[in-house]
Amino acid sequence: MTNAELTEETLARETDAAKTGDTGTPGTGRASDVRRIAGMNEEGEQLSEINPAGSPLAGASAKAHSHGGGAGIPDSSRAGRLTSYHTADFLAITGREEDWRFTPLKRLRGLDKVTLNGAAPVIEVSKPDDVRVQSVDRSDGRIGTAGIPEDRVSAAAWEAFTEATVVTIPADFVADSEDQVTTLTLTGAGTAPAASHLLVHAERNSSAVVVLDHRGSAVVSENVEIVVDDGARLTVVSIQDWADGAVHASSQQIKVGRDAKIKHVVINLGGDLVRITPSARFAGPGGDVEMYGLYFADAGQHFEQRLFVDHAVPNCKSRVTYKGALQGQDAHSVWVGDVLIRKEAEGTDTYEMNRNLILTQGARADSVPNLEIETGLILGAGHASATGRFDDEQLFYLQTRGIPEDVARRLVVRGFLNEIIQQIKVPALEERLRDAVERELKAGAL
């Protein structure tokens, strides 16, 4: 397949770009495995300039770090976005910004404007004996190790939280059964704007599954830090099954160590406005990131997912797959996937994909894959996006086998979303999500 080749799928829109050859063994990073992208040299394309001293993006509160805090051109390169712990360093949100252009700001219920002094969600914990869960104050040295807030709402939550919940998977611990899943059930404690802070830390060579299960009614801005130490294997599943009317903005920052692997799964089912912004950064070579998402938006719901994968070190791999279904008037989903391959990230292997299935009139899905490449010495890089209605040929095929049309439509939707559900590898949770999809289909009379 040639670079920037376009591929047509059965759904209505498809964009495949920057896909390179598949010589060698993926992920090995050997020089013989790396194919140079046509039109690029070892230096890559110069995608953005670094702002000179005195730039507003280089303020004192924008902490200097290896992932671009305070450097770059606003809204140009993803590396140039402002990062800060202080709300005042971010301009008031108008809706004209790239990060907020799809978000119905009036429905944020003050998360971007007021002090977040409401009660944080109440957390109930189910865990294996060896896993430690602690409530700590904001001065704890472990807080802030995964990343810095990247938008005004996240910074407001950082300023407002007083206590954080820290989940520690001890070194060499291996969760080898469903009973050893760590589950945090976060139940809304009211509708006053609130802040919440979580840290999940998988120590060296550990292996675990952590579920963040959001329920009830809330208006909350949440920061989630995920630190995966060298050699660790961690699955984090974030479920947003809120009651009607809930508003949830969650910044989920992931730091992946050398030869570590993270599987990050986002499930959006309930709430009025849910906005999840996962960011994954590699701290050492050999890292592996898998990001999956499933969303089912009903009439009036706004589900927004904005992802960032920052390849800043050599020989790392990332895969992003998000799928959504929408039904009802003004059901709206947004998926924006940003992948940055920096100059020093030779041997990178990355691909991101989003698929949306529109079930009824009046629903809308916005899908924007973005790929920045600053070096041509990579294994592969590509992205894809598709949005469309049912495939009439699939429905016709099932109906010719004696399956009624309404049943056939449900079968297509179940099969479409099941690819994501089966990635969780927790049977009880997978069954719960299949039941949730079935309830959504029945509610839509599909």
Image (cartoon, rainbow, N blue to C red):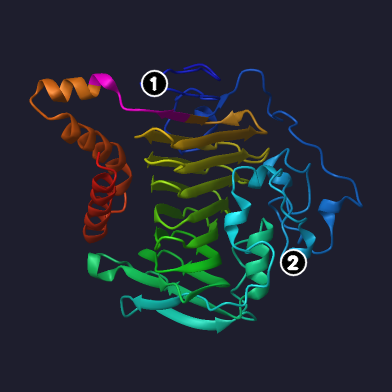
Answer above or below: position of 37 versus 138.
above
Q: Which residue occupies 50% across, 31% down?
A: 383
Q: Position of residue 132 (x, y in %)?
A: 41, 79
Identify the residue at the far right of this view.
Answer: 54
Answer above or below: position of 12 versus 99.
above
Whether the residues at callouts 2 and 1 have beta carbons within 8 Å, the answer is no
Residue sitting nearer the eye, 75 or 258:
75
Q: Position of residue 141 (x, y in %)?
A: 62, 77
Q: Position of residue 413 (x, y in %)?
A: 27, 37
Q: Is residue 392 magenta?
A: yes
Disc 2 marks a residue whose amino acid type is His
Q: Which residues are magenta?
A: 385-393
Q: Is residue 410 visible?
A: yes
- Side (left or right) of 216 relative to 255: left
> Circle 1 sits on which residue?
9
Disc 1 marks a residue whose amino acid type is Glu
* Residue 164 position by quadrant: bottom right
Answer above or below: position of 359 versus 14.
below
Q: Is residue 64 magenta?
A: no
Q: Which residue occupies 25% across, 39% down?
A: 446
Q: Which mark is residue 86?
A: 2
